[in-house]
Amino acid sequence: MRESIVFVAALILVFLSTVLISKKLIPILKSRKMGQKILEIGPRWHKGKEGTPTMGGIAFIIPSVLVGIAGCVYITVTDGIRESLPLVFTLIYGLAGGLIGCVDDRAKLRKKQNEGLTAPQKFLLQVLAAALYLFGMAMVRRAEGLAPMTEIYFPFVGKTVDFGIFFYLIALLLLVGVMNSVNLTDGIDGLCSSVTLIAGVFFAAAGYLAGGAAPDLRDLLLGAILIGGCAGFLVYNFYPARVFMGDTGSLFLGGLVVGGAFMMENPLLVIVFGFWYILETASVMLQVGYFKLTHGKRIFKMAPIHHHFEQCGWSEIKIVVVASVVTAVLSVVSLVWGLR
């Protein structure tokens, strides 16, 4: 019962705070001319969005972190600090992604173009954040008297494989890869917010199903933060968007989503319930690779794949609905067959 009360309270607090902060933040971003620049190689019909305030992710990052801290304090008081640390490190990892995104967004605005940090700079910072996250989670296991995690659970087949030291390479690739995949998903109005809201529902449901005798409050709190933050932001981000989250928001959400999968000790499951994120990255990789191999031919009309669907005549709302339904279906599949 207490877990449900905490979950509902956290969700409502994050939702209302995000709506209120967004309402105050949008005029500030406009007055400081912090508008999105649109790439020349991007969809020409997106030119009308140029100047829409960006870095709006600040609106849900602030309440998410504050409510998350309060939740961690509550878990520490009721269940002990070791129980709260995985959520603490997941929040820190998400915040690290948000800070990297903020630096990137500021660089874009300063340069007055849609390219901020260089790819190597961003990648290096993300790898560093992921490595520190894995170190923190390893320290939690050590405090519990457990060996460092080197095993990966394969959902649906129910097998666990020990990768030894190679676990950390796989983990780094997954952490950085998913964080960037969520970032790529933020390409049309409301897409990233909607898909991640469904991911939040997955974490909340997993908290109830995988908690044994009592729900897992860490999963519930993460779910509440994602649902409340994304729902509150959608008030202003749904088509036609009045604000964009920017890399500030999308990298923060990416860190929470993939960090949550590691917190559940079921990291590969993010590939299933987060399939749409992976699809966005896969479409870019396939497009670039095929373009180079064939000297100019393309698989998709445009990548990431949401732009391909736009080129096929789909409206932004239709793409968001389809992506959300796909994520919801795969989340149910993950809950029924993928949990440990």
Image: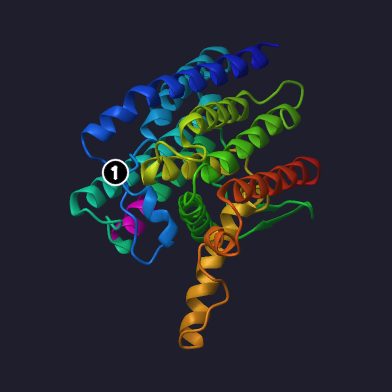
Within 10 Å of disc 1 (Cα), the crowding (few <14, some 14-19, many 20+) is many
Residue 119: where, in percent of width, then height? 33, 62
Foreground pick, 245 / 215: 245
Q: Residue at x 46, y 84 (%)?
A: 296
Residue at horizontal 51%, vertical 22%? 15
Per the rendered image, the range of residues in magenta is 121-128
Rendered location of residue 96, percent (x, y): 36, 41
Identified by mark 1, the residue type is: Gly
In depth, the one of 279 and 132 nearer the eye is 279
> Residue reaching furthest left?
110
- Residue 24 is one of the magenta-drawn residues: no
In terms of secondary structure, where does tag 1 sit? loop
In the picture, the quarter occupied by the C terminus is top right
Magenta region, main secondary structure: helix
Q: Is residue 228 above or below residue 307?
A: above
**Residue 99 seen in render:** yes
Whole-percent x, y for residue 38 in the image: 34, 56
Q: In which quarter of the image is the N terminus?
A: top right
Whether residue 146 appears in this view of the structure is: no
Left or right: 52 in relation to 220: left
Quadrant housing residue 120: bottom left
- Residue marked by disc 1: 35
Image quadrant of residue 26?
A: top left
102 to the left or right of 130? left
Residue shown at 50% from the left, 86% from the top: 293
User: How many marks overall?
Assistant: 1
In the image, 28 versus 92, the foreground residue is 28
Q: Which colour scheme is used?
A: rainbow
Q: Residue at x 44, y 44 (%)?
A: 250
Quadrant for residue 42, please give it: bottom left
Q: In this view, does 194 lie above or below 24?
A: below
Coordinates of residue 61 in the picture (x, y in percent): 41, 31
